[in-house]
Amino acid sequence: MAETKGKFDFAIDRGGTFTDVFARLPDGRERVLKLLSRDPQNYKDAPTEGIRRVLEEETGKACPRDQPVDTSLIGWIRMGTTVATNALLEREGEKTALLVTKGFKDLLHIGTQARPKLFDLEVAMPEVLYEEVIEVDERVVLRQDGCQLPKKDPKCIVTGSTGDSLEVWKQLDLEQVEKDLRAVLSRGITSLAVLLLHSYTWSDHEKAVGSLARRLGFTQVSLSSEVMPMVRAVPRGYTVCADAYLTPKIHQYLKGFTSGFKDSLKDVDVLFMQSDGGLTPMEQFCGSRAVLSGPAGGVVGYAVTSYNQMEKKPVIGFDMGGTSTDVSRYAGQYEHVFEATTAGVTLQAPQLDINTVAAGGGSRLFFRSGMFVVGPESAGAHPGPACYRKGGPLTVTDANLALGRLLPSFFPKIFGPGENEPLSLEETMKHFHRLTQEINSFLSSNQTQALKFTEILIAMGFIRVANEAMCRPIRALTQAKGHDTSKHVLACFGGAGGQHACAIARALGMKTVFIHKYSGVLSAYGLALADVVEEVQEPCSLRYEPRSFTELDKRVELLSKRCHDTLCGHGFTRSITTEVFLHMRYEGTDCALMVTAAGYPSNAQSCRGGDFRSAFTKRYLKEFGFIIPDRTIMVDDIRVRGCGKSGIKSLNKTMTGHGKAKPVTVTKCYFEDGYLDTSVYLWEELPCGHSIPGPAIIIDKNSTILVEPCCEAHLTEGGDVCVAVGSDPHCALGTELNTVQLSIFSHRFMSIAEQMGRVLQRTSISTNIKERLDFSCAVFGPDGGLVSNAPHIPVHLGAMQETVQYQVFREGISGPVFFVASRGHHADIGGITPGSMPPHSTSLQQEGAVFTSFKLVTGGVFQEEAVTEALMAPAQYPGCSGTRNLHDNLSDLRAQVAANQRGSQLVGELIDSYGLAVVQAYMGYIQSNAELAVRDMLRDFARRRRQQTGSLEVESEDFMDDGTPIKLRVQINEAEGSAVFDFTGTGTEVWGNCNAPRAITLSALIYCLRCMVGQDIPLNQGCLTPIKVIIPPGSILQPSMNAAVVGGNVLTSQRVVDVIFKAFEVCAASQGCMNNISFGSERVGYYETVAGGAGAGPGWNGRSGVHSHMTNTRITDPEILEKRYPVILEQFSLRQNSGGAGKYYGGDGVIRKLLFRNNVVLSVLTERRSTRPYGLQGGEDGAAGLNQLHRADGRVLNLGAKTSVTLQPGFSLFLM
């Protein structure tokens, strides 16, 4: 299909700023072209202009801009575009309405209920893509074995595409739907997204709505069952909304593009790149598959050009642009994900696994409380970096210019207000001079660092910090998935990457950097190399076992035929391949893997497509570190990817040179050893076969490559640059404070905690840890003080420090050099109720197993017998049981050991690199840095408070639902930047479980301080150094040893936060509760925390339906909940106008109604049912919550804030 002899072929990447064009000419030559994506004074459409210019220049025939382009000489056109991405980022898609099952109008607003930034009190989340919602009174539920609800009419029983049996509880009322749709049309909305529960398996209702909507005149109708038929209503809903929102914009763009050609490109083969790295015909290009269209071309480009099939050395793609850097991995197969978030929208569609970090050439440079910070803010294209002469800020680009790594004389003169001036080194150095004075002034007054910074040292420092920021996602992509980073090749492309590639490869232990000759336009070149892809997928609910193989084989055969027929329709014949994937998971878990049987031929114990069981277990073991041999394997989806081979083969070779490569000039460039003479070469003049020792700079039209000292570049016969990266000459680092190193160590410690978290999530088995993400990981110093944590669950953090320090200072323990720790919420550890969250516990023993200090691993051996005995020990107490889920407890404990082992290994590697004394010194410095930020915040608050009131004292009081007061008085020392937090007057320990150990109060306090600092500092022990905490013994905040405390962790912690923020008048109260709901029986157990409203602040409204403050766990998707548990979710929506009115209103809470199918024990542990969340500065209080029991006979009972009750089938919990 790619052979179009005698014609021009074009591959075009239309980016946000530039459009890149790769053209293959009739004589086999290749041309590349770069032009502005928007230049309305000169042309309407950049890709059309690029094609016009090439045709005019190469044929010598005039091709006027005001006339359609002649297509007789065009073979094919392939395009990647950011049209969909930009529309999503800028929220400029089509006006869209969402039609959804009744009771779920706010489902996509609530989403997973987690907030994106843990310490931002103003919870900023992207708004939903639809403007209006239509609720449809229809309902379909999955049938369950053992369900004790009354049987339905057999006529209402249907079979889904998965083979599941369903009951239609409420038929679709098309007359009412028509009225609602007409009303929406009358308001000018013509794009419709349809999301009905369980439509992934039974889509009749969605199809009926779709037919009606098209008949009424909706121009775009997207059905979730067609866009992506996969279980999980929330991501499927986001995906169908994105499809309805973006597809009209894509069609609008395509109409404009084709209008620039004769006959609208009727006889030209036009293909578009999808997010999965495959091309699709223009008429099939849709919004949900277009979001990564641009970056996908680059992945294909580096994968095809830099992966050696003989050596099979995996490649990391490193695409550094102006505002961000994309990293991805290729090891012979494209790595796909089926759920990823872009611009705040989670899309459930096959996408290349591309990780983005907010560090690019335009990332801004800051100095904050003793730390060098790069990004995430960007200077953008306007005004751009300071050197662009438009009043912009300092950026990474400016740092490279200051160091001599960018040469203005080789850049076009397109800068300044008139866009006719060169890059300005003078403007850059002015900014660095001001920043140098600020930094040196800060250091001389706050720290003992002897080194005085110069402008060049500061620029170098920022480059090192930026490089470390970009190393983090690469480590996540490799180490966190069990791959050795150093065994990879770094394939660099994008305009800014060449200046950083050698340093990043060296930091990661990589030995080779590969930069393709078209690296500046690699996304466009990748389009020319790509193949046409057709994917089909359908849901499934089969066990992977012999009796299912006939059905599996039949369905695979039908899907493969669909792929084959579609590709034949696109003109392919013999060059078609298909690959089968099964979406597999262990029964009872929620972590599915999309598995191919490539390399695992079929046998007597497998289906015809291959030995998927072996492929799944081997991949599971590699990714998660364990398998579950006795567990059934489920197939959730069947996917077939058909591929029509159509990529070109580039055969152009570079001339072989004789003699030495000659530099065009020699410049001074700054490196770690100071200024060095650096030869400058023009890439186009370099012959292949020559080596260029570093330091050197290689320049072409679109990029600059820095070859660092101890590195050596050579040109391949294809004209590409390959750099051998030498080891860094050892530069000993002393224990004295270096501010640049402080910033780098901060990244490294945070990266260690993040990697620990990824290992824990990967290797755990329980829903609580693996899916709800109810865990935390952290690194601690030799004294047990918190050094760095990953942004997990705030309530864990201070408590983890107290726990670690208890182990450190026990008698007989001596000489630890550091600690790592992980904490996870085990769903059951025994006690008086399933889920170990009893509402009415009065002693610690009733809440399950208790560990003061227990050695889990001795001599490398996991102490399974001893820990099992401890987990079963609660059974000795009256009315208590031992753990009800020992298997998951043991598996999750092993996962925590694996996470700690990973953390220990990574800290050990740091010590090997820098020495123990240096690592421990920087642990201390990072804590001191956090201390400094808190002192600055307290001084600033004290100054404002003194000016307003003349007092340096604040106080507040709030009450638990039982009337227990929590009282706080804060005395601030403005000179020292210190404070005393005195909780004297707080109520006594309670006969119940809302008692909170001292560690919980410290967790709340450290969280509040970090929020009030208002900038991205490490959260660690240093935050508490300026703070003296007084808690009266015997109070609810420092109870006796055996007091019941389960409610203290999840409820009282939230009230302590409210009291602290009330004293400082930072924001109004949030929901002040975690709404703990658990239910279970002998066969099943489930636990969830339910979101509420976030408090408003001075300048912002509170977010509705989100977790706040001390927790941030996710909630189970409605379809998964109903599939796995004996419950039906009847409503999950916002509780309108419950947040409290004011100039800025509080976030609304939620309404959640659960109907139970079987006998279960329900436990409810909540707060704010009698005391209302306070408003501030005249704002109204929020509404109190309510827990009701709706009995099957119609009676409605108030359950109160805390209760445990046995429910019969047909009973409902109504929570709001």
Image (spheres, rainbow, N blue to C red):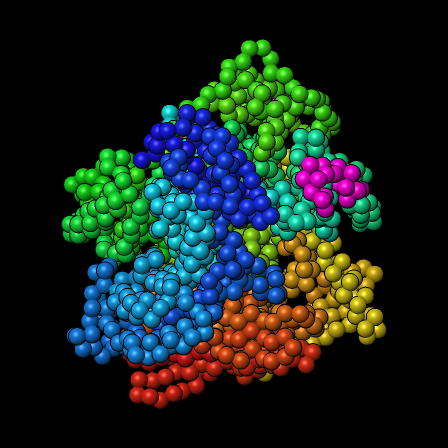
Residue at left 57%, top 63%?
A: 124
Residue reaching furthest to the top: 659
Left or right: 1052 with respect to 558?
Answer: right
Q: In front here: 893 or 539?
A: 539
Q: Is residue 233 visible?
A: no
Residue located 76% across and 58% down the image: 936
Task: Write down the quadrant of residue 313 in the picture.
Answer: top left
In this rendering, does residue 266 appear at all? yes
Foreground pick, 299 / 235: 299
- Decide: is 791 above or below 410: below
Inspect the magenta stretch and tell me whether residue 143 lies in it: no
Horizontal side of 660 relative to 640 (left or right) equals: right
Nearer the observer, 801 or 957? 957
- Looking at the rendered image, the quarter that the N terminus falls into is top left
- Up the image or down, 919 lies above or below 1157; here it is above
Q: Residue at x 17, y 52 (%)?
A: 551
Q: Is residue 908 above or below residue 857?
A: above
Instruction: Tell me which residue sits at (24%, 76%) in the image.
Output: 148
Judge whether 69 appears above or below 835 on screen: above
Please provide percent x and percent y for residue 239.
40, 59
Give the tally of numbered discs. 0
Q: Whole-percent x and y of residue 349?
A: 38, 53
Q: Is 418 included in the stretch rendered in magenta?
A: yes
Q: In this picture, which residue range is highlighted in magenta?
A: 413-433
Which of these two is toward me, 356 or 428? 428
Residue 864, x across and y down, in percent: 39, 51
Question: Residue 849 at x, y = what percent?
Answer: 44, 63
